[in-house]
Image (cartoon, rainbow, N blue to C red):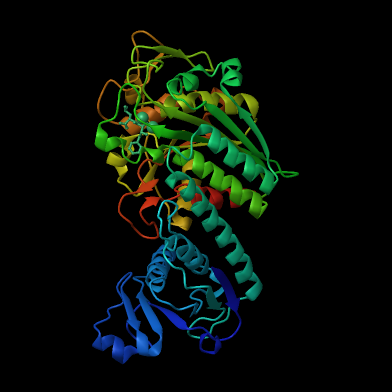
Amino acid sequence: MKISINNAHLYDVSAELTLVFALSTDELLHEGVLSELCFKAEQDEICYLSEFKTLYVGVEANEHDLFRSAAATAIITVSKYKYKSLKLAQYDVNNSEGIFSALVEGFLLGGYKFEQYKSEKSPLFLEEIIFSSRTLEDEHSELALLEAKLLHAQICANATNFARDLVNATPEDIYPAKLSQIAKELSEQNGMSLKVLGEEALAEEKMNAMLCVGRASRHETQLIHLSYTPKNPVATISLIGKGLTYDSGGLSLKPAASMVSMKLDKSGACAVLGIMKAISELKLPVEVHGIIGAVENMIGGDAYKPDDVLIAKNGKTIEVRNTDAEGRLVLADCLCYAQEKVKSDYIFDYATLTGACVVALGQHTSGIMGHSASLKESICDSAQKTGELVGALPFNRYLKKQLKSDVADISNISNKPYGGAITAGLFLDNFIEKENKEKWMHFDIAGPAYVESAWGYNPYGASGAGVRLTLDWLSNLK
Ligand code: BES
Ligand code: ZN
Ligand code: ZN
């Protein structure tokens, strides 16, 4: 679908259908008819006036995320019609409130459909969306600025949809080596370098915790290291992704109902790939290393077990008390690898790590954990700007004690049933070197990564959580 900008006033732009966002019912062109139809301009409320070829969508307040959501509602509605072109005004002079970018993202994210496994694909009639560079009140925005914002928003939304496609694919289609192949294609297309470590190389690197998690799988465990290295970068950052292409729970097997949708457990890895795709297209002046632990957690005679003691890459011993707490074992080794191989200014990890995080914050919000208050604050700013929701979960020394083990340096699960998202974060903290504590941030995306019932601009399935937030944060690095 093509999105373009036209310098003419909305009424002079030619298109089959007009879209109007209504903040209130006053001063609308079709006020009388809308009133007869009891249109109240509530958030995401729609009213289609076929005789005027105009679709009205309500927006509760002048906030970019409400426009993002309204754009998604509009595109879902329009995709049921046969119109080929749609026009709308600009709602934010020079995009000062971020509303123009939000509308572009809302169209692309809300219009996303995953139909890879459907024999019949839904027809796509709409070919073009045309923005007027003027508001309904005829205030004008700079065309060049809008063009730049359009390109930026398209790259970010398409990268999010790229991550969604990967997460939505089945574990039969995306297993660790396949994820490596996708990273390879991305590296070739976007001019990045790639290193893949198979099981032999991982053993040489002493990444025993990660290797044990994947031992019962018929698929080889792999570490993917994708690097984007522009000249004279302003900063270097490592992004570590949990890439469990399937999480059955292992011998601590998940109950049948909880296992359904565990293809989502590669969401952290796919977010990292999406971010890498976008930064290389945006050509950001930041050196970025994407490091992915691609593993499948299965059962079998060769499976790792509760009672095993694993030695992680940094030499710490881990008592396994539950094989379903596997993500932290994979991340432990990947965090050690990242710190040994790359001298970074920032280290972020993304993981669908705990059900406890969903209990704590709900299904829409990612948990963020780390030691630097200022880093947390800057991440909250990016969340606010992109409409992603985050909540900071605080570490404390009492919860840290819950990971004590009688047989090894640390246990892979807490000895108490509370604070599970934080104890998982504290587990990872054991694998962060002293000098890197302030550089590290852990994102538990278990809640928003996979959408069970559509919300906002997220249809059923993978959401691409973490991608747009991180891209905004990276774009602000100086
Ligand atoms: N991948 C799961 C976490 C998860 C649960 C993600 C639900 C998305 C939705 C993770 O590997 C896991 O199973 N964690 C356990 C930890 C427990 C054994 C300490 C959990 O959350 O139950
Ligand atoms: Zn698990
Ligand atoms: Zn998992």
Q: Nearer the viewer, residue 101 or 247?
A: 247
Q: Is residue 196 left or right of residue 293?
A: right
Residue 120 lies in what quarter of the image? bottom left
Query: Residue 88: percent from the left, percent from the top?
Result: 48, 79
User: Looking at this rendering, what residue extends furthest in the right direction?
Assistant: 231
Q: Nearer the viewer, residue 477 or 341?
A: 341
Identified at 39% across, 18% down, the residue is 303
User: Looking at this rendering, what residue extends furthest in the top direction?
Assistant: 407
On screen, residue 217 above or below 455: above
Residue 305 lies in what quarter of the image? top left
Identified at 24% across, 82% down, the residue is 38
Query: Residue 108: percent from the left, percent from the top?
Result: 48, 63
Q: Is residue 254 left or right of residue 15?
A: left
On screen, residue 320 above or below 115: above
Quarter of the picture holding the N terminus: bottom right
> How many numbered discs, if any?
0
On screen, residue 293 above or below 268: above
The answer to whether residue 476 of the structure is visible from this angle is no
The answer to whether residue 257 of the structure is visible from this angle is yes
Identified at 24% across, 88% down, the residue is 36
Query: Residue 471: percent from the left, percent from the top?
Result: 55, 50
Q: Is residue 76 left or right of residue 158?
A: left
Query: Splitting the image into four quadrants, where does ligand 3 fall?
Result: top left
Q: Nearer the viewer, residue 169 or 25?
A: 169
Query: Residue 454: percent from the left, percent from the top?
Result: 33, 56
